[in-house]
């Protein structure tokens, strides 16, 4: 390029700026092709010569750590698998009798242990592994794959496994290797292998009240509804337990301020195998200084743009049911908090108003009675005409039941004794 330009200048011919720019771009492309061809020849080295390229710490294995995303896309064929570790949550450990002695383990150690046994070797601990698919032969090089593990940045329990295959490996063998990896992961008791990838469908509300929520482009392909709950310190632990143990959701993330869950629900469309397809539902609850917020996202169904307008849609059904249960749960906790405050002789609620209204206490008691199990006991009193003996016996029985003899705390509520609560 430079010699040709010098010759043209010597001949008195001028080179246009456009020609120079085009020539520079062509040269840049040729240099990039040469660089990538050299890299491709380097990636084919295993089985060439007497060097053990798969040895621990070899320059060949270290080179895989520096590959860019574009280089991996150009030189490898990839299969992606997502896994969620499903060990106990911090709230479940806290409620355990031996919670202080229990070591928090959500299944990661078991998952990486299985991966280490399945892989041929480790390139970077808990990040990059490799597996030799076909060893080198006299007339052919070795075929291998690179397994990369990446923990989701938004939810702590979601892990993405990317298996990069190098060499002329057909689709049947790639699927066989992926299936072998899946079967080994099924030995883990505390993980869920997802039916399809969901990392692009996880939308996270900002933790800071002043930070606006700017949806990503992928969130526009999700149905979304949100609502707020009554502020209470016990709302997040209780909803975490209900969604996980009762609702059938698996936990994607759980900490002191936020919990994120996911669940696959079947839709009415059929897959190529004749089975019903599944849509992912992402549920999150966030506790902030300005309140408790719940967001529910669901994978968009085909040709369904406003599913919450139709009561028969799957999204509308899930939204209405979960919202009602969450609001009832928060109200029940508020009633519980109010009544516990009476035990501590605290007559001031979270809003700064005095909680000394008998009607409010009657409402809280009625709400908790609906959730309580009923137990009946028959007490023998004096017959009619015994005067004040029955009233005296009634007070003695009440005083005895609320005394410290049973090691229970008691407080008298401001409810009218003649006010009927419940049936």
Image: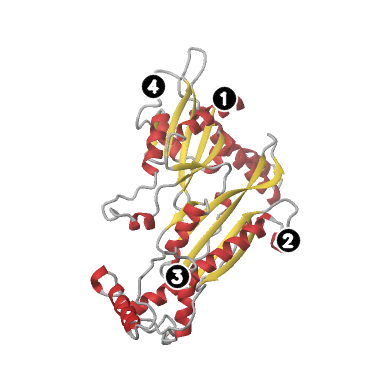
CA distance separating discs 1 and 2 = 46 Å
The residue wearing badge 3 is 333
The residue wearing badge 1 is 173
Horizontal and vertical percent for residue 87? 40, 47
Q: Is residue 30 visible?
A: yes
Circles 3 and 1 in contact, beta carbons < 8 Å: no
Horizontal and vertical percent for residue 79? 56, 36
Q: Residue furthest top?
A: 138
CA distance separating discs 2 and 3 = 32 Å
Q: Please tell me which of labels 2 and 4 falls first in the chain.
A: 4
147 or 66, which lies in front? 147
Callout 1: SS: helix
Horizontal and vertical percent for residue 232? 43, 71
Q: Tell me which corner region of the image, top left, top right, bottom left or bottom right, holds residue 194.
A: top right
CA distance separating discs 3 and 4 = 67 Å
Q: Residues within 10 Å of mark 3 (few under 14, many from 20)?
A: many
The residue wearing badge 4 is 51
Q: Quadrant of the N terminus?
A: top right
Q: Which mark is residue 310?
A: 2
22 or 300, which lies in front? 300
Q: Please tell me which of labels 3 and 4 falls first in the chain.
A: 4
Marks 3, 4: nearer the viewer: 3
CA distance separating discs 2 and 4 = 66 Å
Residue shown at the point (53%, 39%) measured from the top left: 81
Q: Please tell me which of labels 3 and 1 falls first in the chain.
A: 1
Marks 2, 4: nearer the viewer: 2
């Amino acid at each position: 390029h430079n010699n040709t330009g010098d010759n043209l200048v010597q001949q008195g011919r001028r080179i246009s700026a456009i020609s120079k720019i085009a020539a520079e771009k062509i040269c840049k492309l040729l240099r990039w092709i040469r660089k990538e061809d050299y890299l491709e020849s380097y990636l084919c080295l295993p089985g060439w010569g007497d060097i053990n390229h798969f040895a621990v710490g070899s320059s060949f294995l270290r080179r895989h750590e520096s590959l860019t995303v574009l280089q991996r896309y150009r030189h490898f064929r990839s299969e992606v698998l997502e896994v969620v570790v499903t060990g106990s949550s911090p709230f479940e450990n806290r409620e355990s009798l031996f919670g202080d002695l229990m070591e928090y383990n959500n299944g990661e150690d078991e998952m990486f242990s299985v991966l280490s046994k399945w892989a041929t070797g480790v390139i970077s601990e808990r990040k990059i592994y490799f597996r030799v698919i076909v060893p080198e032969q006299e007339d052919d090089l070795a075929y291998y794959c690179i397994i990369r593990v990446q923990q989701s940045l938004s939810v702590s329990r979601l892990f993405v496994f990317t298996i990069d295959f190098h060499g002329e490996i057909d689709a049947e063998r790639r699927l066989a290797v992926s299936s072998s990896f899946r079967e080994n992961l099924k030995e883990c008791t505390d993980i869920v292998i997802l039916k399809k990838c969901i990392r692009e469908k996880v939308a996270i509300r900002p933790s800071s009240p002043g930070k606006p929520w700017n949806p990503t482009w992928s969130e526009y392909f999700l149905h979304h509804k949100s609502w707020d709950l009554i502020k209470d310190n016990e709302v997040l632990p209780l909803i975490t337990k209900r969604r996980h143990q009762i609702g059938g959701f698996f936990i994607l993330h759980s900490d002191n301020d936020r919990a994120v869950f996911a669940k696959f629900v079947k839709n009415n469309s059929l897959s190529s195998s004749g089975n019903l397809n599944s849509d992912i539902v992402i549920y999150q609850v966030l506790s902030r200084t300005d309140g408790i917020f719940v967001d529910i996202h669901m994978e968009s169904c085909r040709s369904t743009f406003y599913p919450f307008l139709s009561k028969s849609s799957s999204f509308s059904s899930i939204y209405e049911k979960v919202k009602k249960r969450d609001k009832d749960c928060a109200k029940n906790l508020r009633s519980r908090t109010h009544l516990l405050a009476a035990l501590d002789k605290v007559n001031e609620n979270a809003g700064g108003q005095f909680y000394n209204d008998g009607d409010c206490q009657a409402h809280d008691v009625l709400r908790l009675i609906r959730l309580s199990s009923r137990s009946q006991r028959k007490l023998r009193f004096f017959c009619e005409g015994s005067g004040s003996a029955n009233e005296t016996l009634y007070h003695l029985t009440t005083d005895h039941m609320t005394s410290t003899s049973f090691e229970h705390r008691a407080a008298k509520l401001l409810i009218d004794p003649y006010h009927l609560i419940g049936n």
